[in-house]
Each structure stands twice: as C-alpha cells, then as structure tokens.
Amino acid sequence: KTTDGGNSWNSGTNTIGTTYRSLAVAPSNGNYVYAATLSQIYRSSDGAATWTNITSGLPISSLAITYVTVKYNDPLTLWVSCSGYSSVNKVFKSIDGGATWTNITGNGLPNVPANCIMNESNNSTDALYVGTDIGVYYTNSTLPGWISYSTGLPRVVVDELEIHYGTGKIRAATYGRGIWQTDLYPEPAGVEDVASACENWALP
C-alpha cells in the first residue's frame, strides 16, 4: 500500500502468499481490503496493515478462487467466483466479511469456469455479472437465477469485467477476441466491439 503517490510502500503483516489472483477494496470504506490467491482469501479492516484468513466455508479443495467483488455500500458484503467444473460451486456470497459463506450459484450458470464477477454500484437489487469461459451471465435479487447476457458476444473466455457508469456500459475483456461492451441490464442493446479504441491507448 502507498499513501504518498508511490514514493514509499508498506506491505503490513503480509503473509498471504506469493501469487495473487484478485484484490478488491471496498468502495464505501477503503480500510476494508480483500485479497485472494487461488486457494486462500484474506480480509483486512485496517487498510491492509493486518490480515485475517476468511477461507473457511469455501469448497477450495477442488476449486480455485478467481475473483472478488465488494458491495458498493457495504464493506462486509462480498462475492467470489470460482473456477473448475463443479456445476453447483461457481459463486459464493458473504454478508459478514467472510466469517460465513452462502452458495448462490443457483440456476442458469453453465458448468464451466467462472473467471470474474462484478457488482453493479447504486443498484438496490444486488445486480451481479459473471464472466465465464463461454460468455457473460447476469442475476439480481428479483430473478430466480442467472440469465445469459452474451447476445452478440463471441462464445469466448471472458477474463475481466468493468463497468463504466458515465456511459452506462459494462465492458468485457476476452481471451484473444478483444474488448467488448454493452448496456447495463435491464436494457441491453447488443454488444459492440471496442477493440479499435484499445489500440489507441497510451501512457499519460
């Protein structure tokens, strides 16, 4: 962690591991940080100075943690996505900072790795998007399960999801097929390729 623009760094009591897969800072409280390797997930509530293992309850013996997302207005509510081919173990939720976990895989997700998960801010229905090996899926608290959210998107591995709130778009980075975007639910208007814009990116 740096608090002076990168002039100095402090890792705190960092004994998590050597390979990190996901890192999430709570949008509503920057003191809450969640860090995960493929097999362990840790929570800090003091700005990454100290860490607590919150892996207990997740079926990690056969799965790999791929991503962490934290609710926009609650630092203790988070979701994790998992890789592997267990049809009933794809997404888990905690409402107490990882002390306990609930399996919310439910219905609708294909039995392929879930590579990333994103919670939509300022959405009272706990809207969630998951990127899988064959596209994007969506759910919220008003739906009975997950629905495909991949109209117009190549049937391809989705490794990263990000939301651009200024334009109301969700963007998906794929493995070998570029970056794509579409409108946020509930008004999807097809998916358009934005890879050409990425080709013009440059360091400031």
Image (spheres, rainbow, N blue to C red):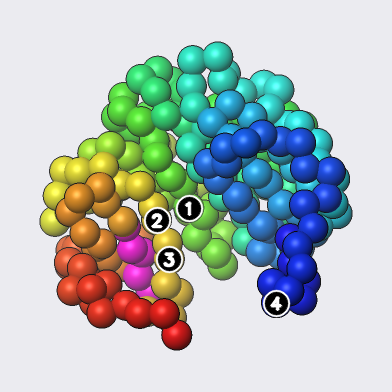
Vertical relation: 195 (above or below) 94: below
Q: How far is mark 2 from mark 4, CA to CA?
A: 26 Å
Between disc 4 and disc 1, the foreground one is 4
Label 1 to label 2, Cα distance in Å?
Answer: 7 Å
Q: Which residues are magenta?
A: 168-172
Q: Are marks 4 and 3 in contact (CB under 8 Å)?
A: no
Residue carrying label 2: 161
> Mark 2 or 4 closer to N-term?
4
Across and down, in percent, residue 121 comes to 55, 64
* Labels 1 & 3 near each other (Cβ < 8 A): yes
Describe the element under mark 3 as helix, strand or loop.
strand
Q: In what element is the residue under mark 1? A: strand
Q: Amino acid at mark 1?
A: Met
Q: Which residue is mark 3?
A: 163
Sequence order check: which comes first, mark 4 or mark 3?
4
Tell me if 192 is positioned left or right of 167 in this view. Answer: left
Which residue is at the front of the view, 99 or 200?
A: 200
Does 84 sit above or below residue 144?
above
